[in-house]
Amino acid sequence: MAEKKQNESLIVQNMGVGSKKNIFEGKIQYLPLDQLEDFKNHPFKVEMNTELFELMQSIEKEGVLVPLLARPNPEGQGYELIAGHRRKVASKWAGVDKVPVMVLELDDCQAVITMVDSNLQREHIKPSEKAFAYRMKLEAMKQQGKRTDLTLSQVGTKSVDNPTLSVEKVVADYDESGKWKLQNESSKIRADEILARQVGESRNQIARYIRLMYLIPKILDWVDEGKIAFTVAVELSYLNEEEQYAVKGRAESCRAGNRRQW
């Protein structure tokens, strides 16, 4: 069944990618795993757990049912994997050497947004993964908003002969659903507001997640492991690195002495 889809064209719609049409057309190809490079700075971890084992067993039995998503590697040969990192690892574990991949032509910002949106569908996402993913998508959205090819003057330069003429700069922006639209610059919606609506979080909550990126690695691990409350971790993120290491040492000493100081 999978082989019959090899030459099948697909249309993929991604509301947050930033394409002028918001639609991407690609073809499913069967590609060797060694041609698929992981997405650069991919924030979502692939863990060898029960869920991955079950996915491996499913692939052994039925093959890869959902194609992976990739783009031509901008840094060399092969392809850069955008969505499907768990399926890639599970396929290798199952002894599968080729997998169905839909290859799309995406620029860097489109690739980041598509990667984040695809992975945010996971059932279990760690706080650190959300932190890095939200920042990556937010930066990509802001970068798209700076594109000079998506801005224009609505009525041109103000005329000396007509001083009452009102000139508004028109810019490309997102609507509430994430689609591109043109609107006056003065009424442009903030990128973090659009992101908040898309992921179902408040702007402040997104900012709190991004604050976690200022934590030292060990404390960030404790957040992911549930050893430190999220709100406490956000407060710790405002300490400098030296102060955070001092907190870490104090916490480890307390735990070693079986004392709860948190």
Image: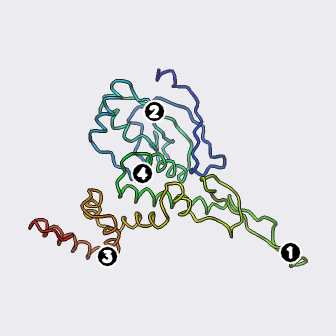
Give the left or right position of residue 58, taking residue 154 as reference.
left
Instruction: Tell which tag, 1 or 3, sits nearer the viewer.
Output: 3
Going from the N terminus, do you reach mark 4 or mark 2 first? 4
Give the amino acid type for the residue marked by disc 3 in the picture. Answer: Leu
Q: Residues within 10 Å of mark 4 (few under 14, many from 20)?
A: few
The secondary element bearing badge 2 is classed as loop
Q: Nearer the viewer, residue 38 or 260?
A: 260
Label 3 close to label 4 by CB (< 8 Å)? no
Q: Which mark is residue 40?
A: 4
- The residues tagged by marks 1 and 2 sit, at their Cα atoms, a distance apart of 57 Å
Give the label, 3 or 4, closer to the camera: 3
Colouring used for the render: rainbow
Q: Residue furthest right?
A: 161
Residue holding disc 3: 239
Left or right position of 236 against 26:
left
Circle 1: residue type: Ser
**Disc 4 marks which amino acid?**
Lys
